Image (cartoon, rainbow, N blue to C red):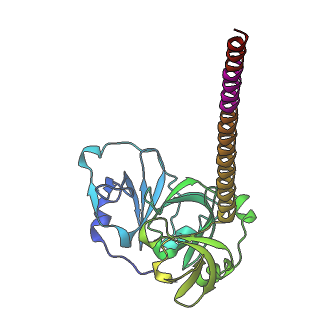
Amino acid sequence: MAETVNLPYLEALKGKFVKVFKGGPDSREGKLLEVKDDYIVLQTEDNQLVYYASQYLKMVIGQAKKASVDVLPVDEARVFPNTYLGLLETLVASSIKVNGGGPESKIGRVLDAKEEFLVLSTEKDGLVVFPFSNVKNVTILESQSNDDSSEVTFSGAITLNDVLSLLIHNWVSINTGGPEKVGGVLVEVADEHVIVVKNEEIFYVTTEQIKVLSLAKDEDENSSNTGSSENSNSNQNSSENNNSNKGSSEDSNSNKGSSENNNSTESSSYESGTAESSSK
């Protein structure tokens, strides 16, 4: 059950033009449309709807100079769910962007949203799993159609561990960069940690440290391609070396032949000179 995040000043800014965060990848400007129990709704000047979880709102700036900026009208009959989870559940089959433009940002189609996780299907990273606590903001890129939602099915998982258990024996990538990034085969999912194996290393990662997890299904293929490329380069280098050695050998033989010809010429000249001397 989501708790109400009490930020009284947000109500006073409702309907006004604001900037969320002073800067950074999560910063956006627009009209503050709604203030709900644990999230806010921002409508940007390009008419995108951005939803921010209130617990991550560090700063909201009132933009007095832009108070008169017009944004496209929103359907007044539209009702936003009271909770952030309720909102995410309505986005199944929609194309969204999660977490602004930061390192953990992902774009994809929502497959499932539950109290502990959000699952996306992405073109770049395949299946992507966000712990619900790390879904800081969401931007709607394309809303679902009435027909789309019935086509989307997932495993029926209820908890984050349920989702992770489905990925056992697959190559996964945990987090997106820095010292917390881990890649390898997921071999075990326990109550509070997962175990990932790569080569001779065994990684024990606490579940609360997982910010985002993707199913890196092409890792083995990439490794294979890399190996093939290296072998190809090695063979090419060997061929070039052989050709070089062959050329050197031919040059040496040529020089040797020239030397023999020179010696033969000198010998003939010597014998001719000796014969002339004898006849005299």
**On screen, 53 above or below 240?**
below
In percent of the image, x 68 and y 65: which residue is there? 220
Magenta span has 263?
Answer: yes
Task: Using the rendered view, name the quadrant where residue 223 is placed.
Answer: bottom right
Overall secondary structure of the magenta section = helix
Most extreme residue toward the bottom is 191
State the image coordinates of residue 79 (x, y, percent, origin top left): 52, 63
Tell me the magenta residue range. Answer: 254-268
Most extreme residue toward the left is 64
228 or 267: nearer the eye?
A: 267
In percent of the image, x 69 and y 61: which residue is there? 224
211 or 17: nearer the eye?
A: 211
State the image coordinates of residue 195 (x, y, percent, origin top left): 57, 84
In percent of the image, x 37 and y 73: which residue is there? 55
State the image coordinates of residue 162 (x, y, percent, origin top left): 64, 83
Would you say residue 21 is visible in this rendering? Answer: yes
